[in-house]
Amino acid sequence: MMLVIERKKIDDLIQTLAKNTSVYIPVRREQGGAVESVFEKFTPGKTIDFYYLPTLCSIKEFFLPAIEDTFVFDKRKNQAATLAQKKPFILFGLNSRDLEALTQLDEIMAKPNTDFFYFKKREMATVIGLINEPIKTPPGGDLILLKVNEEQYEAMPITKKGRALTKKRFFKKESAVITNAGSKSEEIMPRLRQLLLDPEFLSDVIKWSWRQDLAIWDELATLCLGCGICTYVCPLCYCFSVEDKIDLGGKTCARCRKWDACTLPRFAQVTGGHNFHKTIRERYYNWFFHKFVRAYNEYGKSQCVACGRCQKYCPAKIDIEKYILKMVDAYVKAKGV
Ligand code: SF4
Ligand code: SF4
């Protein structure tokens, strides 16, 4: 016996949840002749995209928005007020890679210091995964709906919030026939996905390729425009800058944080004008270094889940999987491993 929900009841579940809370779901839309998936607030008539494409805005935007006023100081009251998220919301339908990314981002934002504003939003959120491929371990979230056959999903509550949801009438205990054999989402960056299983090896490869001054880095430096898009779309890039915005009357001041990107020209520029990463070659390597070397040193894993966003949205069409594989090939040949 397992706890299941019929696929056709998932819409009813969303409609019920949306009566009291904002629910965000993946939907597919056509814009300018292109088909894309986006997370949107559910309203009646919207249909869940069960196999969503890599979205331009990743789930980090719900917890670490592109621009955010964190607190406002009011000179007249001599008081600072935080602008932390107060309303609960539900993020529905995350695939396994996005769930994995969110779990990793939680770890990053908790260490070495806990990010107050990020976790205020995380506390307010209930995260429900919709996984279509077989999994070995649940990748995160509060509740996972795991496809077991064409008509049914197994409900796997992970947290108290998730368990509370499964008390709703849409879930029932029954013996289900498991026939699920795979999913379309498995097709995205499959070789990078495989390499991510050995983050130590990947870290060695990236470091080695730079020290060897491989021509790949010249090629990438020629292609890369230094636009920062790969960082903005990545669910695991989290660098931000902070600035104070004072109103014209000088009465209030808001502390604002906004995304930054290590590929941008002034990212590593300090007071006095010195720039630690003057060239795009250095800056683009830094992006790789942080994801695959520094992340491994600090967290024991790469900061990448092979979601496909950086590859899809890069205006220079840089396919990081292809270049990492080239580095791996060169490494294997040189070391004979
Ligand atoms: S999105 Fe592409 S062009 Fe822009 S910084 Fe990233 S790799 Fe370079
Ligand atoms: S594939 Fe690209 S966008 Fe996705 S997690 Fe990896 S580095 Fe980030």
Image: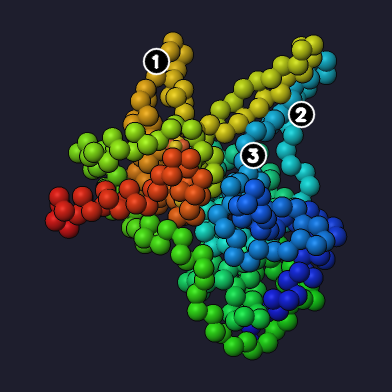
Q: Secondary structure at mark 1?
A: loop
Res. 165 visible in picture: yes
Considering the numbered disc 2 on the image, is that residue within a helix, a strand or a loop? strand
- Which corner quadrant holds the C terminus? bottom left
Residue lying at 54% horizontally and 47% vertically, measured from the top left: 235
Residue drawn at x 85%, y 60% is 19
The Cα–Cα distance between marks 2 and 3, rounded to whole angstroms, is 19 Å
Q: Residues within 10 Å of mark 1 (few under 14, many from 20)?
A: few
What residue did someone put label 2 on?
81
Ligand 2 within 8 Å of the CB at mark 2: no
Which one is in front, 131 or 219? Answer: 219
- Alpha carbon distance from label 1 to label 3: 29 Å
- Residue on which disc 3 sits: 65
**In the rendered view, does 179 fall on the left or right side of 121?**
left
Label 3 beta carbon within 8 A of ligand 2 = no
Question: Does 276 sit left or right of 309 as displayed?
Answer: left
Specify which label sits upstream in the sequence, 1 or 3. Answer: 3
**Amino acid under label 3?**
Pro
Q: Secondary structure at mark 3?
A: loop
